[in-house]
Image (spheres, rainbow, N blue to C red):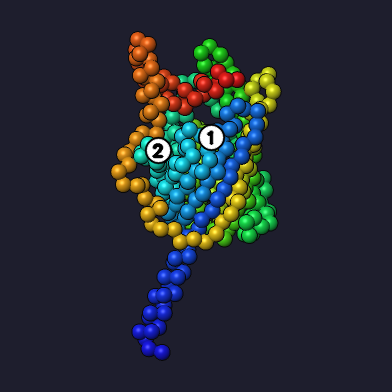
Amino acid sequence: MSQKMILVGLIVLSTALSSSAGWEYSAVTRAEGSSQHSEMMNNQMTSWVDGGNAKVEFTRSGNPMMPAGSFAVTKDGGKTMLMVDPSKKTYSKWDMAGMAGMAGGAMQMMNMKMSTPKVEKLLEEQGGKIAGFATTHYRFRTSYTTDMEFMGMKQSISTVTEEDLWASPELNEAGLNAWMNQQGAKTGSEQLDKLIKAEMEKVKGFPLKRIVTTTTKESGGEPQVMKITTEVTSIKKASPAGALFEVPAGYREAPLFSPVMDEERSSRGKRGQAPSSSGSADENPLLKIMQEMNKGK
């Protein structure tokens, strides 16, 4: 066999291997709990992955920040994530670090202080097969107490979160974990977030199932439990086209929170009210959400 034929054969083999290096998977998230906002956590999605490239498309969603039909794309394993809304032909930077900063700002405004933060790895064992892949079952526990003073009210809340993960070390492409990394816990406390990140880095591979159970208890109140389960329902080899990971031509960039803030400012202007000062709920959307949730209790 000539060297030329061998070279051609190697090129064909290399192309075949690289073209089957990607993945396509579907997953569903279900939330259970006493909170009226649990529906916001429910979604169904389909994702395409090729190395560090990933696209996550939401086919059903209760979260207005990621409505059905919207999708997220990344080309660097989730370090930079863009949220795309085809209905508005816009894209926004999905910045969890920035949102954590706003959460930290809200904590300062509400005189919130965290105490006794603790993150523990409780379990690591064989987890059986999920979707045809062998898994390792991990369990982590995060606990802390939050004391706050807001609008003349003082409150103390204890929080305990247990997280079970069934991860497959066979699935280790960076793009597979892109969305999970973006959805990792961001408490607004730099110290606690570092502790959580350090423990979660012990997980090897892609989680095919994840159960997060959070129990909160206000001083003198009844415990409130929220359970969120995310499970991969199917996963297969794929050869996604590069265009899948691009923002469509002609789409404009829009701030992630701007429409909500602008609408509120406009409403205040029509009522003859002056725009609120920096640091108010108008300027901090996370604080606005917290206020709305408190009204709905």
Q: Who is closer to the viewer here, 182 or 23?
A: 23
Q: Is disc 1 surrounded by few (<14), some (14 to 19) or many (20+) residues within 10 Å? A: some
Please state if 164 lies on the left or on the right of 4 as rendered.
right
Q: Secondary structure at mark 2?
A: loop
Residue behind mark 2: 87
Q: Amino acid at mark 1?
A: Gly
From the image, state whether disc 1 or disc 2 is nearer to you. 2
**What quarter of the picture does the N terminus occupy?**
bottom left
Residue 144 is situated, as x and y percent measured from the top left of the image, at: 60, 31
Q: CA distance from mark 1 to mark 2?
A: 16 Å
The residue at the point 62 percent across, 56 percent down is 131
Against 33, residue 204 (above or below) is below
Against 47, residue 251 (above or below) is above
Residue behind mark 1: 62
Against 235, residue 157 (above or below) is above
Residue 247 is situated, as x and y percent measured from the top left of the image, at: 36, 47
Residue 213 is situated, as x and y percent measured from the top left of the image, at: 64, 37
The residue at the point 41 percent across, 79 percent down is 9
Residue 57 is situated, as x and y percent measured from the top left of the image, at: 47, 46
- Say which quarter of the image contains residue 38: top right
Mark before the other along the chain sequence, 1 or 2? 1
- Say which quarter of the image contains residue 254: top left
Q: Amino acid at mark 2?
A: Ser
Question: Which label is found at residue 14?
Answer: none
